[in-house]
Amino acid sequence: MGEVGVAVRALRKRYGATAALDGMEFGVEPGRVTGFVGPNGAGKSTTMRVVLGLDTADEGTALIGGRPYRALRRPMTHVGALLDAAALQPGRRARDHLMWLARSQGIGARRVDEVIGQVGLTAVAGRRAGGFSLGMRQRLGIAAALLGDPGVLMMDEPFNGMDPEGIVWLRGLLHTLADQGRAVLISTHLMSELQDTASHVVVVGRGRVVADTSVADLLAAASAGGHVTLRTPRPDRAAEVLTAAGGTAVPAGTGALHVSGLPAEEVVAHLTRGAVPFAEVTAHRATLEDAYMRLTRDEVEFSGTDPGGGQDRGGARDARGGQDVRGGQDVRGGQDVRGAGEGEQA
């Protein structure tokens, strides 16, 4: 592996009257998986394109190992990217696709076979990529990203199309890559998977960073105002004891209270000292999705109300007018997927 790490500094980029990037700034450190999340149109794809030399910022810098992408010699040995799973020649066999990329970077056939095995495609390496499912195309794209044994990996929606076994495999692979000292950046809309995969997260909205912190700290902050559910045969007495201790107890059905202002362990301690019997004390902690929704609720381009009265936060169009403009194969081997719901089985 070569020099690792990504530094994005004060990036600005406009598409006509729309500011796609408005001072975007963050770093991707080696030795950890960093999640890169935000609403549609927040600037994630534009940022990744600028870092990978596929687009040019109006202002600011994007460096890989201290150098811009265009200054990298044999760039796949520095950074591997998964951007567009559809960017394949459908008539080309999987191994031939990787050999074509490898030859462009001076990488040998032995390494091609290594990455094919690493992503679990050995049995289908001779098959044409056009017959692959979405999950299999994702694996082929990951193999392409790994070809140069790079110190930096950037993946856009890598979990798309993966079946449960594939998700577990990919999570383990990303952890292994980070443990090897690589800088790993993944963009995804699947907050539950990100919570289990990333140790750090960069949240963006409207072209700028909203939060740049560890997943643990973000969850702790989001859970600070959480509540405890208490079940007791004496709710009135429990409410009296907990209120005296500085908490707030609100009835939540027969024999149940929602308690705020006190952590679960203090609720138990006060009830025990007050000789109040209880059957259950459950702490409700925020998920990464909870934290994300709170951080980005004012960052979406538009929102609507669904028939059930909830808010629809999806649907924001990309700053370039809703089209994915990354299409086309390049030496990054990158692949981008926007559709899901397809299993990995051929």
Image (cartoon, helix red, strand yellow):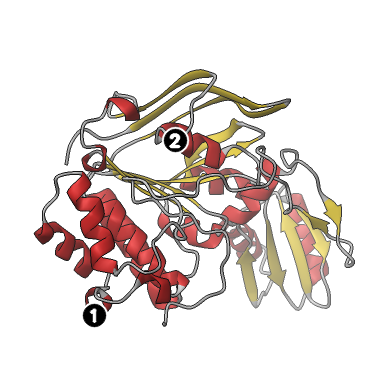
Residue 150 in sight:
yes
Direction from residue 107 to residue 189 in the image, left or right: right
Direction from residue 4 to residue 231 in the image, left or right: right
SS for tag 2? loop
Front position in the image: 80 or 90:
90
Q: Are marks 2 and 1 in contact (CB under 8 Å)?
A: no
Residue 149 in sight:
no
Vertical comparison of 323 with 60: above or below: below
Vertical comparison of 71 with 233: above or below: above
Residue at image point 58% right, 25% down? 13
Residue topped by disc 1? 123
Q: Position of residue 300 (x, y in %)?
A: 73, 42
Residue at image point 56% right, 68% down? 340
Q: Position of residue 122 (x, y in %)?
A: 22, 75
Residue at image point 63% right, 69% down? 281
Which label is found at residue 54? 2
Amino acid on which disc 2 is placed: Leu
Which label is found at residue 70? none
SS for tag 1? helix
Q: Quadrant of residue 257?
A: bottom right
**Classed neighbour count for the residue bearing mark 2: other residues with Cα under 10 Å, few (<14), some (14–19), many (≥20):** some
**Classed neighbour count for the residue bearing mark 1: other residues with Cα under 10 Å, few (<14), some (14–19), many (≥20):** few
Amino acid on which disc 1 is placed: Ala
Residue at image point 60% right, 59% down? 264
